[in-house]
Image (cartoon, coloured by chain):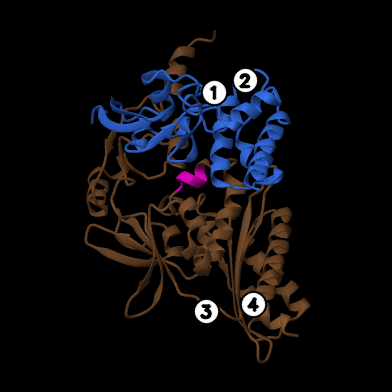
Amino acid sequence: MRPGYFEDLESFVEISSVKFEYLEPNSLKEACSMLAQYKEKAKLIAGGTQLIPLMKMRKVNPEYLINLKNIPNLEYIDYYSDFAEEGVKIGAIATLFDLGRSVIINERASVLVEAINKRELRLNKTRWAYYMTTIGGGLSSPDTAADIAPALMILDAKAVMQGLQGWETVPIENLFTTNGNGEAYEIIGEIRIPKQQESEVGLVYEKSAGKNGSPSIGAAVYLRLDLKHVDIEEIRIVVGGIGNAPVEAQEGPAIMKGNPIDDHLIIDAADVAAGEVCGDSDPETLERTRELIEEAIRHAIDRSIGDFALGY
Amino acid sequence: MNGSKKTINVKVNGESYELSIKPKMTLLQLLRNELGLTGTKQACMDNSCGACTVIVNKMAVKACSVLAMQVNGKEVTSVEGLASRDGKLTPLQEAFLEHSAFQCGFCTPGKLMSSTAMLEEMSDPTEEDVRRDMEGNLCRCTGYVQYLAAIMAVVRQRKEGSK
């Protein structure tokens, strides 16, 4: 038996050889205070699907673990309507399982369900993480957010952040910028997805699984047609899984916007968009991204035409 | 900071427990070391193999990667809780026996728990659904055929029963 085996075994069996204090705040505001008090020594935990494996590998050794899961009334999925807009609101500790089977989400944000279902194939070889991962936790790191963030970005979703001084609403993409958006020690409290136009719009999430260490890439596409003139009125493309954060392509969609549906334009737009989001990636990733975006655009066109096409 | 013990209330296989535990204890340790339920197996410890799968509030989770604190107030079922108190096996357990769906048997509790949760959730899974769902339960004896047959037999049985 090799020396040190039992020491290894002890830390292997215990989650970590480092002790931590377990804290259970009763509100998000209290959690913010704890986070501000203990700073880098503290980590938030909700589902734990991301943190616990990291703690087991001793890549993360928090001295304080702040459990958000027992904060009451943070698991809701409901409609909201205020003076400015209406849509769907999701409490930060609603799990991906809750979202996947929610009638509201399936009706109003089915592209998010597509992303969740395809995420399952990528990250989790079981339903374990699907059951445990919370939407707030899933968005807390670029890696775990690679699938759900592009879908939320394409839906123009916002995160409602609780800070020490109160709430603020930020676009999803701001969650991945350095230092977040302003105040430190903020915690995601809610995700808001504004109501989408339902007809003549195609919303699609497509996935390409990576093999042999190459990244799994997800592409979300929003496409709105002007059916009177069969022009593409609006198109947005968000790609996740490459680099540190999901990226929204700008130049690729610009090629198609305002133009009729055309095969060459789709190929050109996918080509340019893939170039934009891939940066210095290897040729295999670039090609795979290009194919994925092209497939997602074609699929979005089919969806946006929908019943209109069937009428002919 | 002292990592002091915390109290949790948890229902395991229908019995309620109030336990004082270290926050760093995993659900797997709780089941095996505190409650003596060693049917749940300890293997990879990094949520890769599925040998430690148990059901928490009707959902299959890997007990090695869930803190015991996270199941406070929840209902946990381990493999010991599948059969009824008088020893009557579930249809899935019967099917596993009938199809010899195990070799050394180490992965069997995890497989039973994953498939039980799956059949609870899906009324009529296809073979592909089962294969996909069971991907996280590894068998080092490479026994991947018989358990699939066992699960599909239960699915067929249920279908016939509902006719």
Q: Vertical placement of A108 versus A210: above or below?
A: below
Examine the residues drawn in magenta and state their main secondary structure: helix
As drawn, the residue found furthest toward the top would be A1
Q: Give coordinates of residue A131: x percent, y percent.
A: 48, 45
On the rendered structure, is A234 left or right of B36?
right
What amino acid is labelled 4 in the image?
A: Ser
- Considering only order in the chain, which callout, 2 or 1, is on the residue closer to the N terminus? 1
> Which hue belongs to chain B?
blue
Label 3 lies in what chain?
Answer: A
> Which hue belongs to chain A?
brown
* Residue occupied by mark 2: B105
Does dot 4 land on a helix, a strand or a loop?
A: helix
* Residue occupied by mark 1: B43
Does dot 1 land on a helix, a strand or a loop?
A: loop
Residue positioned 69% across, 34% down in the render: B148
What amino acid is labelled 2 in the image?
A: Gly
Of the 4 image quadrants, the one containing the N terminus of chain A is: top right
What amino acid is labelled 3 in the image?
A: Gln
What is the magenta range? A129-133
Residue A160, can we see it? yes
Residue A161 magenta = no
* Residue occupied by mark 4: A304
Label 1 lies in what chain?
Answer: B
The number of numbered discs placed on residues in the rendered structure image is 4
Q: Give coordinates of residue A202: x percent, y percent.
A: 61, 74
Q: Vertical placement of A282 versus B47: above or below?
A: below
Residue A197 marker? 3
Which of discs 3 and 2 lies nearer the camera? The answer is 2
Q: Give coordinates of residue A42: x percent, y percent.
A: 31, 41
